[in-house]
Amino acid sequence: MAAVHSPDPTRAALGALLAFHALRPAQVRALLVTDLADGRLRIGDGRIVLLAAEVCHRLHAYLAERARRWPDTANPHLFVGQFTALRTRQVTGTWVNQALGMSAQAIREDRILDEALAAAGDPRRLCDLFGLTVDGAQRYTSALGHMDLAEPPG
């Protein structure tokens, strides 16, 4: 995915969080700088996510860029933009999608579907990894039989 490999540290960090850990867009927006510690991320639903090395690398680059661009910001949120750096509110969903160049929700859904395929449709694994309800996980696993997701012949 282009966002994960972007030279823009903000886009790369956002893309990595969504593509590797399938955070909800609202969770990404609500993250605080203090939620990130020792390669782990505390999410608003109470889960603690052990971050992939690729995600840690991109978050580190983003935090360096954030500190360079807005060294005196009082905004406690992890992600800040031009308008929120001078305030203490979180970025908007529109800001996240614009920074990514695509829908954050679409990246999340693709990641969950990819995991559903890798887990052979095990809804428990989706619940454990992504904090989904059983009904939510079953929605993804039921999509596996859809013809558009089937392997092409040959």
Image: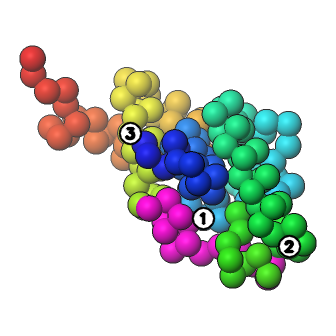
What amino acid does circle 2 point to?
Answer: Thr
Q: Residue at x 17, y 40 (%)?
A: 148
Q: Residue at x 44, y 46 (%)?
A: 2
Label 3 and label 2: CA atoms lie apart by: 37 Å
* Chosen colour scheme: rainbow
Element carrying mark 3:
helix
What amino acid does circle 3 point to?
Answer: Leu
Name the spot of residue 94 as percent of width and height, x first.
Answer: 51, 74
Q: Is residue 43 above or below residue 145?
A: below
The tag on residue 138 is none
**How many marks on residues?**
3
**Quarter of the image containing the C terminus?**
top left
Name the spot of residue 49 as percent of width and height, x first.
Answer: 71, 39
Q: Quadrant of residue 140?
A: top left
Residue 113 placement, left or right of 60: left
Question: Which badge, 3 or 2, comes first in the chain's sequence?
Answer: 2
In this figure, which residue is indicated by the disc labeled 2?
A: 73
Q: Residues within 10 Å of mark 2 (few under 14, many from 20)?
A: some
Determine if the magenta segment contains residue 98.
Answer: yes
Determine if the magenta segment contains residue 108.
Answer: no
In this figure, which residue is indicated by the disc labeled 1?
A: 26
Task: Give the extent of the magenta segment.
Answer: 87-101
Q: Which mark lies nearer to you, 1 or 2? A: 2
Question: Which badge, 1 or 2, comes first in the chain's sequence?
Answer: 1
Q: Nearer the viewer, residue 128 or 102?
A: 102
Q: Residue at x 65, y 65 (%)?
A: 29
What amino acid does circle 1 point to?
Answer: Ala
In this figure, which residue is indicated by the disc labeled 3?
A: 113
Disc 3 + disc 2, Cβ < 8 Å = no
Element carrying mark 2:
loop
**Quarter of the image containing the N terminus?**
top left
